[in-house]
Image (cartoon, rainbow, N blue to C red):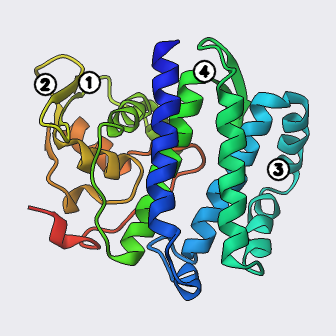
């Protein structure tokens, strides 16, 4: 239970960090383009708002969420695009206010979760820990699109460990959504944390991925191509994984092209 409480607290901190980035923006800035093609900063926050609302419903009203899930299955594009279209007609203060309200309600719902609770979602049900971690990952990933659009840097924190862990667990999923067979060879992951500690997954020897935790997280949420990072891969299995890594649910994403953020490599 203590671990779940920690992840919820880290999710709240991630919300606060992103809020600090967007709260002071001018109205025109909200409609500035982000690296996600066709998406503005307004769209990024709206997307987070919509799925925070869906997450709150999945926990507090599973039957209502089941109805929403059925609607999504009937017309997935309209289901996700309608909130974007509506928010494009709203004042920025309203968009920000709705996100703040949505995430507060979601965190309130999360506070009642037991670690072994299974939560329905778009795909197989998720454990409470994975569910909350996924919301943290989404917040951080879309926040990256926003800071990239603004040309600002944000401080890497220990919260990255949650995202890195999810990225490691999602290795089989990345192969699945790309229609590929995952090699039997395991891949060790060895990352340098923001505080200088070393985070590891897997046993030494064989294929491996090594480098800054920040870079690994950027790759697994498809906000950087591996060639634009300081990650070092050893073995074909490690290299292939980093080229297709995807920690978030849904079909295979386009990611970022090599050289899109060249200044960060090396």
User: Element at badge 3?
Assistant: helix
Q: Position of residue 146 (x, y in %)?
A: 45, 68
Q: Picture quarter containing residue 232?
A: top left
Task: Tell me which numbered mark, 3 or 1, is placed earlier along the sequence.
Answer: 3
Disc 3 target residue: 72
Q: Residues within 10 Å of mark 1 (few under 14, many from 20)?
A: few
Mark pair 2, 4: CA separation: 31 Å
Residue appearing at x 72%, y 41% in the figure: 105
Q: In the rendered view of the protein, which quadrant contains the C terminus? A: bottom left
Q: Which mark sits nearer the N-terminus, 1 or 4?
A: 4
The residue lying at 24 percent from left, 50 percent from top is 215
Q: Is residue 203 left or right of residue 9?
A: left
Answer whether labels 3 and 2 touch (C-beta < 8 Å). no
Cα distance between the residues tagged 3 and 2? 43 Å
Q: Secondary structure at mark 1?
A: loop
For the residues labelled 2 and 4, say whether their Cβ atoms are less than 8 Å apart.
no
Q: What's the CA distance linking mark 4 and mark 3?
A: 22 Å
Q: Which residue is mark 2?
A: 206
* Lower position in the chain sequence, tag 3 or tag 2: 3
Q: Which residue is mark 4?
A: 127
Residue 237 in picture, x, y percent from top left: 25, 36
Report helix, strand or loop for mark 4.
strand
């Amino acid at each position: 239970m203590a671990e779940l409480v920690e992840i919820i607290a880290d999710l709240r901190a991630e919300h606060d960090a992103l809020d600090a980035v967007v709260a002071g923006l001018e109205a025109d800035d909200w409609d500035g383009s982000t690296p996600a093609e066709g998406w503005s900063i307004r769209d990024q926050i709206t997307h987070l708002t919509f799925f925070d609302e869906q997450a709150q419903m999945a926990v507090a009203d599973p039957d209502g969420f089941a109805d929403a899930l059925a609607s999504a299955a009937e017309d997935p594009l309209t289901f996700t695009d309608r909130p974007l279209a509506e928010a494009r007609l709203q004042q920025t203060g309203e968009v920000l206010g709705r996100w703040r309200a949505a995430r507060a309600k979601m965190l309130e719902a999360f506070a009642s979760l037991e670690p072994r609770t299974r939560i329905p979602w778009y795909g197989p049900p998720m454990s409470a820990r994975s569910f909350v971690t996924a919301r943290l990952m989404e917040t951080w990933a879309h926040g990256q699109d926003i800071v990239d659009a603004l040309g600002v840097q944000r401080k890497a924190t220990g919260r990255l460990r949650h995202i890195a862990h999810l990225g490691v667990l999602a290795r089989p999923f990345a192969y699945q959504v790309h229609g590929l067979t995952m090699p039997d060879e395991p891949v060790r992951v060895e990352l340098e944390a923001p505080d200088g500690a070393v985070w590891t997954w897997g046993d030494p020897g064989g294929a491996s991925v090594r480098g800054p935790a920040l870079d690994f997280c950027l790759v697994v949420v498809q906000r950087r191509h591996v060639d634009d990072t300081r990650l070092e891969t050893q073995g074909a299995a490690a290299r292939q994984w980093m080229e297709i890594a995807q920690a978030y649910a849904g079909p295979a994403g386009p990611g970022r092209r090599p050289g899109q953020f060249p200044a960060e490599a090396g």
